[in-house]
Image (cartoon, helix red, strand yellow):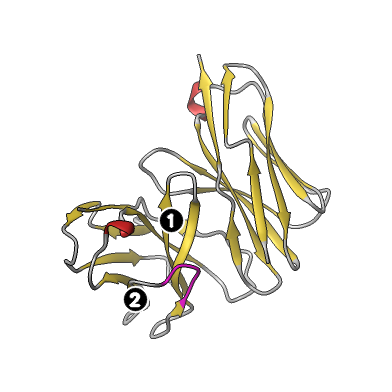
């Protein structure tokens, strides 16, 4: 059974304190891994797609990396506006999408 | 660009009542999805559609029905609402076929409370 696990469930940081969010996966065959950001009261918004181990994508203070078993979303010098829930999702060779439960990030000024 | 639009945004129902949630997308996407999101449980797939006139069951389909009469619209129905169906419902769409790696585009959700 395909499984996507995100950790930690919640993360509280001070402004400027860098950290990483983890998404580990066990799937029948990975076609792509997605990161989304979800603000309170809104739907998830697409951030990155990663396709193969070793790949990295960057956007402002965010950098996503991928290995054969997990992905990390690194947040460098976060600001309060980075506070949100970050969701990871995988597409499998069977054409199926599976979402993790998300990590809720709070950045204090 | 409207993207994915969900109506209504909020609704309160009594147990046993019925209602329909509407999702409309203007991106000409083939695939559309209905999810529910409960605290601490992430997104769970209810039903999905791979094109006009098609529907398929997802992970948690019981108590829900769907229809895709037009490519741009995907309707989610609750025939007899139950308190366990209190949740936030999200609709999403994406481009491409079965093995596409295009991302999903989400609406802003319908917050449904059943008393």
Instruction: Give the side of residue B51 with respect to residue A90, left or right.
Output: left
Vertical order, A41 against A26 (above or below): above
On what subunit does the disc labeled 2 rest?
A: B
Residue under disc 1 on the same chain as residue under disc 2:
yes
On what subunit does the disc labeled 1 rest?
A: B
Residue B92 visible in this rendered orientation of the protein? yes
Vertical order, B35 against B51 (above or below): above
Does the magenta segment cover residue A84? Answer: no
Q: Name which residue lies at 42% across and 66% down.
A: B27
Label 2: element kind = strand
Label 1: element kind = strand
The location of residue A3, given as percent across then percent down, is: 66, 58
Q: Which residues are magenta?
A: B57-61
In the displayed orientation, state which residue is furthest to the top. A109
Which image quarter: residue A89?
bottom right
- Which numbered disc covers residue A105? none
Quadrant showing the N terminus of chain A: bottom right
The location of residue B106, given as percent across then percent down, is: 43, 56
Give the residue at mark 2: B66
Q: Name which residue lies at 52% across and 68% down.
A: B95
Mark 2, other Cα within 10 Å: few <14 / some 14–19 / many ≥20: many
In the displayed orientation, state which residue is furthest to the bottom. B53
Q: Name which residue lies at 67% across and 74% down.
A: A94
Q: Main secondary structure of the magenta part?
A: loop
Give the residue at mark 1: B106
Which image quarter: residue A73?
top right
């Amino acid at each position: 059974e395909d499984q996507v696990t995100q950790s930690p469930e919640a993360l509280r940081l001070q402004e400027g304190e860098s950290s990483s969010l983890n998404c580990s996966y066990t799937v029948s065959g990975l076609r792509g891994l997605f990161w989304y950001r979800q603000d309170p009261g809104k739907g998830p918004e697409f951030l990155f797609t990663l396709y193969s181990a070793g790949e990295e994508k960057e956007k402002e203070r965010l950098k996503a990396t991928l290995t054969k078993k997990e992905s990390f979303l690194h947040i460098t010098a976060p600001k309060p506006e980075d506070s949100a829930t970050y969701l990871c999702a995988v597409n499998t060779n069977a054409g199926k999408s599976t979402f993790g439960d998300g990590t809720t990030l709070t950045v204090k000024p | 660009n409207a993207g994915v639009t969900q109506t209504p945004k909020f609704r309160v129902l009594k147990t046993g009542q019925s209602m329909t949630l509407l999702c409309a997308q203007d991106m000409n996407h083939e695939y559309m999805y209905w999810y529910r999101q409960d605290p601490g449980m992430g997104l769970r797939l209810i039903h999905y559609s791979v094109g006009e006139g098609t529907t398929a069951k997802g992970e948690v389909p019981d108590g829900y029905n769907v229809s895709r009469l037009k490519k741009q619209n995907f309707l989610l129905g609750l025939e007899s609402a139950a308190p366990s169906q209190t949740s936030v419902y999200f609709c999403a769409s994406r481009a491409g076929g079965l093995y596409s790696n295009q991302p999903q585009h989400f609406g802003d959700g319908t917050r449904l409370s059943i008393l």
